Amino acid sequence: MMDQLKTATFAGGCFWCMVKPFDQWDGIHGVVSGYTGGHTTNPAYEDVKNGSTGHYEAVQITYDPAVMPYEEILQIYWQQIDPTDDGGQFHDRGDSYRTAVFYHDDDQRELAEKSRQSIAENGNFKDPIVTKILPAAVFYPAEDYHQDYYKKNKEHYQKDRAESGRDEFIKNVWGKKV
């Protein structure tokens, strides 16, 4: 079965808020918080956060495409972010909090481009879609205390997420209660 698993990588602002939306679905075998797309080897959280590494905060998802197709993962992704904001996400500002889809093969690239075009045309956004679609780079898992943060630090996670404005945005744009 491990031979059938694939990898998807997304930057969607604070990685704490990007794990749970994927973690709860059948076909998802793991979601790891980490850093990618920058120029520093083995970056530390504080260095990524202060913008000196060029890395995005991201999640790397291991999934079974027979159960959870990449197209569905993309749909979940788009409904977690503001794809029109190139300065970060919600209350998290700066380059490390930008959005991007990191593709691992040509199929993922094509599907990501098609889904971004669909998002641009669906009428939910008046501003241009600025989320980048980039080739996957080395992914560095974040420090242990960041992994599964929503489970290990439930109260702080819920407070931070509520204050971020992310859930209100999702409800207003997608009509979904989070």
Image: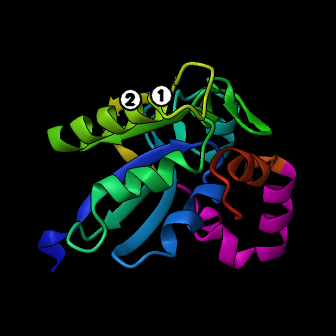
**Residue 131 in view (yes/no):** yes
Picture layout, residue 124 above or below residue 147: above
Q: Which of 14 and 168 is in front in this view?
A: 168
Picture layout, residue 60 above or below residue 148: above
Question: Which amino acid is tagged 1?
Answer: Ala
Q: Mark 1 Cα within 10 Å, few/some/many (few <14, many 20+)?
A: some
Q: How is the image coloured?
A: rainbow
Is residue 150 shown in magenta?
yes
* Quarter that holds the C terminus: bottom right
Residue most toward the front? 123
Rounded to the nearest angstrom, the CA distance separating label 2 from label 1 is 5 Å
Q: Are marks 2 and 1 in contact (CB under 8 Å)?
A: yes
Which residue lies under the disc numbered 2?
117
Q: Give the range drawn in magenta.
A: 141-163
Judge left or right: residue 28 versus residue 42. Answer: left
Which quadrant of the figure has residue 177? bottom right
Residue most toward the top? 128
* Quarter that holds the N terminus: bottom left
Query: For the residue labelled by badge 1, is the local secondary structure a helix, a strand or a loop?
Result: helix
Q: Where is residue 73 in the image (x, y as percent from the top left)?
A: 39, 57
Which residue lies under the disc numbered 1?
120
Which quadrant of the figure has residue 92? top right
Residue occupying the point 23% across, 66% down: 65
Q: Which of 146 and 22 is in front in this view?
A: 22
